[in-house]
Amino acid sequence: GYYSLAEEISELDIDSIFIPTSSGNAALGIHQGLKKLGKHIPIYIVQTTKVCPIASLYDKEFTKTDNSVVTCITDRVCKRKDQIIGLVKDSCGSGIVISDEEVRETSKKYSLPINSSISIAGFIKALKKGYTINRPLLVISGS
């Protein structure tokens, strides 16, 4: 299923992909599809201050929390963690950890539900951290 999504993505003029990540299946599927198509696009894993077993390996600028307004990122174990770390490295991407404040601000600014604001909040934080990204694809899911 993710291969057809990767085909659509491969036709876009983008320089990065920001993906809200719980289990990592979407990121992994998109990355594998892009590799089959010979496309190299950096993938940024976006997780919350509550659940960030992957993104916290790359982003150290946050305070861990016990709660989060984001309800769709819940996989603390991440059985495919090594594969997700591998895809981040292979794609030359990174991980971004977002706070409740960052996602609330994004939700309000763009009139989106909290769970649909994750990748946008991650992109905004990446820019603040100094990443050079000009044409991102921001995966928006959830409600």
Image: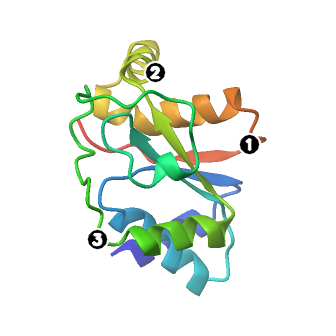
Residue at 25 percent across and 25 percent down: it is: 69
Q: State whether residue 100 is above or below residue 119.
A: above
* Left or right for 22, reference 106: left
Residue 119 rendering spot, x and y as whole percentages: 47, 39
Quarter of the image with the N terminus in it = bottom left
CA distance for labels 3 and 1: 30 Å
Estimate the x, y position of residue 6 in percent, counting from the top left. Answer: 50, 71
136 shown above or below 2: above
Crowding near the residue tagged with mark 3, few <14, some 14–19, many ≥20 C-alpha atoms within 10 Å: few
What scheme was used to colour the molecule?
Answer: rainbow
Name the foreground residue: 64 vs 108: 64
Amino acid bearing label 1 = Ile
Mark in front: 3 vs 1: 3
Q: Which residue is mark 3?
A: 79
Q: Is residue 4 visible?
A: no
Instruction: Give the amino acid at mark 3.
Output: Lys
Report which residue position mark 1 lands on. Answer: 133
Tell me which corner region of the image, top left, top right, bottom left or bottom right, holds residue 11. bottom right
**Secondary structure at numbered mark 3:** loop
Does 125 sit above or below residue 37? above
Direction from residue 77 to residue 94 in the image, left or right: right
Q: Which mark is residue 45?
A: none
Q: Amino acid at mark 2?
A: Glu
Measure how far apart labels 1 and 2 are at the Cα level.
19 Å
Q: Quadrant of the C terminus?
A: top left
